[in-house]
Amino acid sequence: MHFLFIAQTAFSLWMLVDAVRRGAHSMWWIIIMVPFGEWAYFFAVKLPTLRTSSSPMVRRLVQKRMSVDQLRHQLEETPSHENRVYLAQGLHDRRMFAEAGKLFAQVVAADDADKDALYGQARCCIETKENAKAIALLERLTKLDLDYAEFEPCFELADLYTASNRVADAEQLLRRACKKSQRIGPRARLAKTLIATGNTSEARSVLEAGMRTFNSSPKFVRRRDHREASLARRLLRAPELRS
């Protein structure tokens, strides 16, 4: 019950802050403060906004999953930038990477700053073993937004650099990520690269500093970053760092 109370309070505060930032009518502030009023605001105001969000990834979280045939029909009926992204993502999710990649490429050609499309096309290129093309796309994306999608494109680019014998580029990229964020993820990935190049002393220092920050973080941060923290712990137990 204590957890439910905290969750409900946090949700109410989220809706109240959203109403203030949105400049909603003061009536909504009162409604949010009464029992279940925050839910009335969410369904009447917040959810419709999410469904028309500028980010296709946000919209996909709140919209019903459609079949590929439905997505094709939707694009035929309304050949918009948005519907092309929807179909491309639907094809990608069903492992139809070649066709998805072509659609993402069309979106990128129309808008070279569309981060969702850049990442989608890069992911398709990785799956179809077009690593050089994937690297070029991920480089463009990380220049636009280094910590996009929780740094996943950054980490994938570092892995591609390493696989292409460009370890120095991987290290440089991950150092940029560490400057951008104190989170354990970039530090664990940088340490892994440093170990591969024999720089074990710095790798240990990077991991220990990252774990100190992680262990002192709020619980929700530790839950979010638990996978990367597990990687950091494994690296700290590696023979190279224990010698």
Image: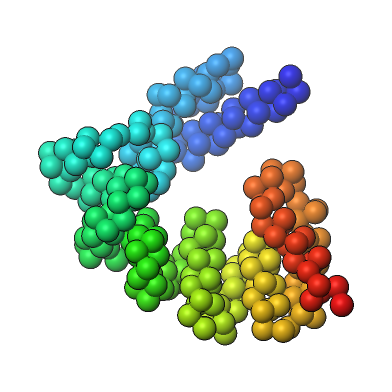
Q: Which residue lies furthest to the right in this view?
A: 243
Q: Does any portion of residue 122 appear in the rendered image? A: no
Residue 123: name its quadrant: bottom left
Residue toward you, 187 or 32: 187
**Is residue 212 in view?**
yes
Left or right: 73, with 214 as reference point: left
Residue 204 image position (x, y, % from top left): 79, 73
Apparent side of residue 202 relative to residue 153 in the rendered image (left or right): right
Q: Nearer the viewer, residue 18 or 157?
A: 157
Percent x, y of residue 132: 37, 76
Residue 206 point in image, percent of width and height: 75, 72
Residue displayed at 25% across by 40% down? 68
Quarter of the image that includes the C terminus: bottom right
Which quadrant holds residue 99?
bottom left
Q: Tell me if residue 57 comes above or below residue 207 in the rendering.
A: above
Specify the farthest residue to the left.
77
